[in-house]
Image (cartoon, rainbow, N blue to C red):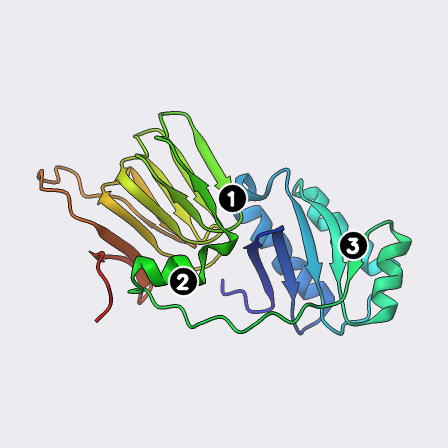
Amino acid sequence: MAWASVNIKGTKDGLLVTMGEGELASLLVELEERLSGTASFFKGGQVALEVGRRELSVEEIGNIRAVLARNEVALGTVISEAPVTRAAARHLGLETKRIPRPEPRPERRARQDFAELSRSEFSEGALVRCTLRSGQVIRHPGHVVVIGDVNAGAEVIAGGDVVIWGRLRGTVHAGATGDDQAIVCALDLAPTQLRIGKHIARPPEGKPSRRPVPEMAFVQEGRIIVRAWKPAR
């Protein structure tokens, strides 16, 4: 199913749920499906809800909060341009904000080089300076950079991109909030399982040994593609 009206992404402040145009009942169904589809990623988190100019009552905000609560996610802040909506949110004890006006972001390309990527995208990321061993799990709503190896049995789950400055042997899920534009880069890319958005790939069985080379994985035409990781020309 393609979700066009409900968007979930990671920011430096946590998870942001944006509700676009459409009937609220339909949006609640989409939200429920998005959350239940990646329950382990969202569980125990807190989100901000952005609703634009939509005017919501106390009951309607309560219904949204109930959907989040069923999936073990807490609603903390309502971001809206509508005074009625902000007043209803405050009545429920929620924080409120006006919709921010962010500066335009440069267009993302799957073949961006690491230097450009680090400048434009990683301001909302997490930097991990260690080797992840079997049983260790990293979860972050934004981008994740690991300076070290990700061993078999370890797991990285990110709302955005994942960069491994080392060997990737464990499991990685980039774009875990449904972002098919996310990418995974590693100096040695040989994961147990690789997921980008809702797409899954595994290495072929009996893969011959090779000299490690930096590689990048991204989604193209509905499937995960792996290419050499090098600056765009």
Residue 219 vertical placement versus 37 (above, below):
below
Q: Is residue 181 visible?
A: yes
- Residue 63 on image: x %, y %: 78, 54
Give me the residue at 40% from left, 68% from top: 108
Disc 2 crowd, CA 10 A, few/some/many (<14, 14-19, 20+): some
Is label 2 or label 3 in front? 2
CA gap between label 3 and label 1 equals 27 Å
Give me the residue at 63% from left, 53% from top: 32
CA gap between label 2 and label 3 equals 31 Å
CA gap between label 2 and label 1 equals 17 Å
- Residue 38 on image: x %, y %: 52, 46
Quadrant in which residue 122 is drawn: bottom left
Disc 1 crowd, CA 10 A, few/some/many (<14, 14-19, 20+): many
SS at badge 1: strand
SS at badge 2: loop
Circle 3: residue type = Asn
Q: 16 or 25: which is nearer to us?
A: 16
Is label 2 or label 1 in front? 1
Q: Which of marks 3 and 1 is nearer the N terminus?
A: 3
Q: Name the residue under label 1.
A: 140
**Which label belongs to residue 63?**
3
- Residue 176 on image: x %, y %: 47, 50
Residue 148 vertical placement versus 202 (above, below):
above
Circle 1: residue type = His
Q: Which of marks 2 and 1 is nearer the N terminus?
A: 1
